[in-house]
Amino acid sequence: MAYAEALTALADPTRRHIFEALRAQPKTVGQLAAGQPVSRPAVSQHLKVLESASLVSVEPQGNRRFYAIKREGLDELRHYLESFWTDVLSAYGAEIALRAKKN
C-alpha cells in the first residue's frame, strides 16, 4: 500500500507545495525554502517524508543535494485513483445497458 504513504505525505499542504515546486526542475533545500513560509530545517524534514514515501529522489552534487520528483513513486497512487475511474465507467456502462433494456 505505497499509495497510502503517498497520500499521507501529500496531505500536508506545505509538503504538497514543496513537491509541486519540484515539478519544473530539481532544486536544493535552499531554493525550496526561499518560496516557503517555513525554515530550511523544516523544508528538510518535509523532504525526508517525501523521500521515504518514494515521491522525491536526492542527488548529491558537491556540497549540495538536489531534490527531484520521483515520477515512478506516483505510479501506485495513480493506479489506485484510476481504479475508482474504472469503477465509475463500469457503473455508467451498467446504467446505460439497463436503460437500453427498458426502452
Image (cartoon, grey):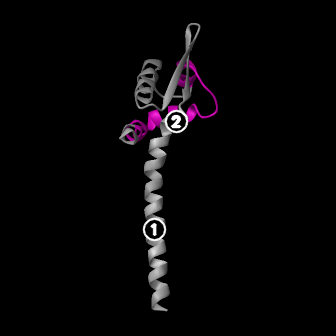
Magenta stretch: includes residue 67: no
Secondary structure under the numbered disc 1 in the rendered image: helix
Residue 72: numbered disc: 2
**Kind of residue indicated by mark 2:** Glu
Dominant secondary structure of the magenta stretch? helix
Q: Position of residue 46 (x, y in %)?
A: 43, 27
Most distant residue in the right direction: 24
Q: Residues within 10 Å of mark 2 (few under 14, many from 20)?
A: few
Residue 90: numbered disc: 1
Q: Residue at x 49, y 41 (%)?
A: 75
Q: Is residue 75 left or right of residue 4?
A: right
Q: Residues within 10 Å of mark 1 (few under 14, many from 20)?
A: few
Q: Residue at x 47, y 59 (%)?
A: 85
Q: Residue at x 47, y 48 (%)?
A: 79
Q: Which residues are magenta?
A: 6-34
Q: Position of residue 48 (x, y in %)?
A: 42, 24
Magenta stretch: includes residue 17: yes
In front of the other: 73 or 16:
73
Relative to 86, does residue 13 appear above or below in the rendering? above
Residue 26: numbered disc: none
Q: CA distance from mark 1 to mark 2?
A: 27 Å
**Kind of residue indicated by mark 1:** Ser
Most distant residue in the bottom direction: 103
